[in-house]
Amino acid sequence: MVTQEQRKRQLAREKFLRQQQRRTSARRKARMRNAVIASVLGVVVIGSLALYTTGVLKDDDKKADASPQTTPSAAPSAAKDPCEKPAAGSVKKQTWKKEPAVTIDASAKYTMTLATTCGDIDIALKAKAAPHTVNSFDFLAGKGFFDHTKCHRLTTNGIYVLQCGDPTGSGSGGPGYTIPDENLKDASLKANVYPAGTVAMANTGQPHTGGSQFFLVYQDSQLPPSYTPFGTMSADGMKVLKKIAAAGENTGGGDGAPNATVVIDKATVTKS
């Protein structure tokens, strides 16, 4: 027969085990969330060629769209593709040895329009606060660098961004040069949050390693202020981005290629 004291000890042990299980589960979830955040915007620079990765580089070579640090929690979404077929044409695979000379007028207003298969995304560029970045986008867009490129990654857990700007569509491409970080004390970045509508650069996590990859924020996302914010989307552009996000990504784990066929048919930078 179990005594009252033995029963108390048994209940105490069971309570302790439940607490340990909850703590272990919480730690596991936190690690997964942090892995997603750390892997999404990563860039690895080798020599003069900027190679962008959203997970581990050697795994990107094998499977570009799935992060090895993220375990899918559900079957991939079967959401209907809300976008149209890409325009005819192919990606221009171009690289340059060094950043182009800054020729933009930092006092003028610049707008970048991404004519995508899902709709146009207009972005007001911050030329005065991020002249090197805006100049680089003006240069690359003028060369047709972004035309016919896929937006290769969508995150729907932890942070909420669509990542674009890789001509290979695999997470391992760039323009061949890097640009300096800028505008990291932008007034919009409060409490380590990149607000919805922000357009910012991806990088390695090390200073001054941005190239051509950038991300569009469709929901407030907590990130360290290490990614150059260089533009703000229009309200109509946000509607397009949210349509893309609503279709989900292909792993079901919150981090993968978008289910929507997101291709930049043409990128244009205009001065007004």
Image (cartoon, grey):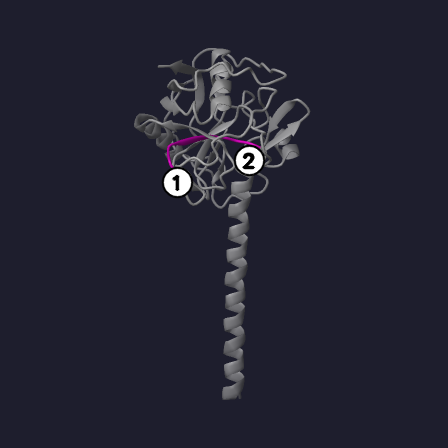
Q: Residue 108 appears in which quarter of the rendering?
A: top left
Q: Report helix, strand or loop for mark 2.
A: loop
Please provide the residue range marked out in magenta: 194-203
Above or below, comparing residue 9 to residue 222 in the picture: below
Mark 2–mark 1 distance (CA, rounded to whole Å):
23 Å
Horizontal arrangement in the rendering, residue 61 relative to residue 77 (left or right): right
The circle drawn on residue 66 is 2
Question: Which callout, 2 or 1, points to the residue nearer the camera?
Answer: 1
Q: Residue 111 appears in which quarter of the rendering?
A: top left
Tell me the residue that label 1 is attached to.
Answer: 220
Above or below, comparing residue 248 to residue 33 in the picture: above
Residue visible at 36% across and 32% down in the picture: 242
The circle drawn on residue 154 is none
| Type of amino acid at the residue the image marks with label 2 | Ala
Q: Report helix, strand or loop for mark 1.
A: loop
Q: Is residue 233 visible?
A: yes
Q: Looking at the picture, how far across and down is residue 63, in whole percent?
A: 60, 31
Q: Quadrant of the C terminus?
A: top left
Magenta highlight on residue 126: no
Q: Looking at the picture, how far across and down is residue 205, in whole percent?
A: 58, 36
Return the residue nearer the eye: 80 or 37. 37
Return the residue nearer the eye: 183 or 169. 183
Q: Looking at the picture, how far across and down is residue 253, in whole percent?
A: 49, 42
Residue visible at 49% across and 23% down in the picture: 133
